[in-house]
Amino acid sequence: MNIDQFRDRIPHENACRKFFESIIWQKGRHYPHCRYDRSCKFRGASSRPGLYECYHCRRQFTVTTKMLMHSAKVPLWKWLQTMYYMVCSSKGVSSVILGRWLGVSQPIAWEMGHAIRSMMDPGADNAPLLKGIVELDEKYFGGKPRHEKGVHHRRGKGTTKHCILVAVERHGSVRASSHHLVPSISIWSYAYTFSLAVRNFCDKTLLFMGRTIVKLPL
């Protein structure tokens, strides 16, 4: 979906609010604090759009209640637009450029970006195990080392950079683990690390970096 199609599908604030309600309340509208699923909508001229009242505790709420977007004064449309830019940008978007695109200051764009990354955290400690086809890959974190005369900086597995291991379920969730939890850099140590995150791991065929295929023993 390009930016024109995105704006045609969600052209204004009310459509954006309805989109969030359809995503967050897929199983029905409920108050996030008491989890009661019966509520009424305020329809008065002086009421805020999208305001509801819980029948159980009589407290008012909106679709952003108990979310990082709730206390912000930024319109929902700009929140959704920020999510679109962050998802579609493979290398990320700086807060300076993001603020220029949204028409907000750089500090506000920076806070919005961090809030969205926090909401995207799947909560690996309580997340279900990966299933189906799971692929593993590695990424070395760190910039290019400074040039030193007579010093050769090794690349790949010989580097001293911090290694991040990633397991991806096809059409599903992602898990990442830092290399300090892995005893050594090898296909078997990687397999052991992710055996804690993958369901029925010993029955799987391990796909590593898109080219190495190892059938794990039972």
Image (cartoon, helix red, strand yellow):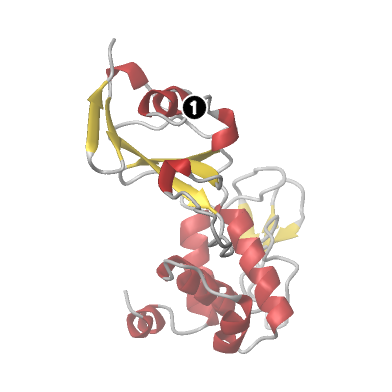
- Snapshot quadrant of residue 124: top right
Residue 130, position as x, y percentages in the image: 40, 32
| Image vertical order of residue 205 relative to residue 96, above or below | above
Residue 150 is left or right of residue 60, and the answer is: left
Residue plotted at (65% across, 63% down): 114
Residue 194 falls in which quadrant of the image? top left
Numbered circles on residues, count: 1
Q: Is residue 120 left or right of residue 200?
A: right
Question: Circle 1 — which element?
Answer: loop
Residue at image coords 49%, 49%: 140
Asked if residue 79 is positioned above or below residue 21 in the image, the reply reads: below
Please state if 191 lies on the left or on the right of 207 as rendered: right
64 lies above or below 6: above
In the depicted view, which residue is nearer to us: 111 or 19?
111
- Could you tell me which residue is drawn at 37 percent across and 44 percent down? 172
Q: Amino acid at mark 1?
A: Ser
* Residue 63 visible within the image: no
The N terminus - image quarter: bottom left
Residue 35 x %, y %:
65, 43
The quadrant of the picture occupied by the C terminus is top left
Q: Disc 1 designates what residue?
A: 184
**Whether residue 26 can be seen here:** yes
**How far across and how far down the image is residue 105, in percent?**
70, 85
Image height of 194 relative to 108, above or below: above
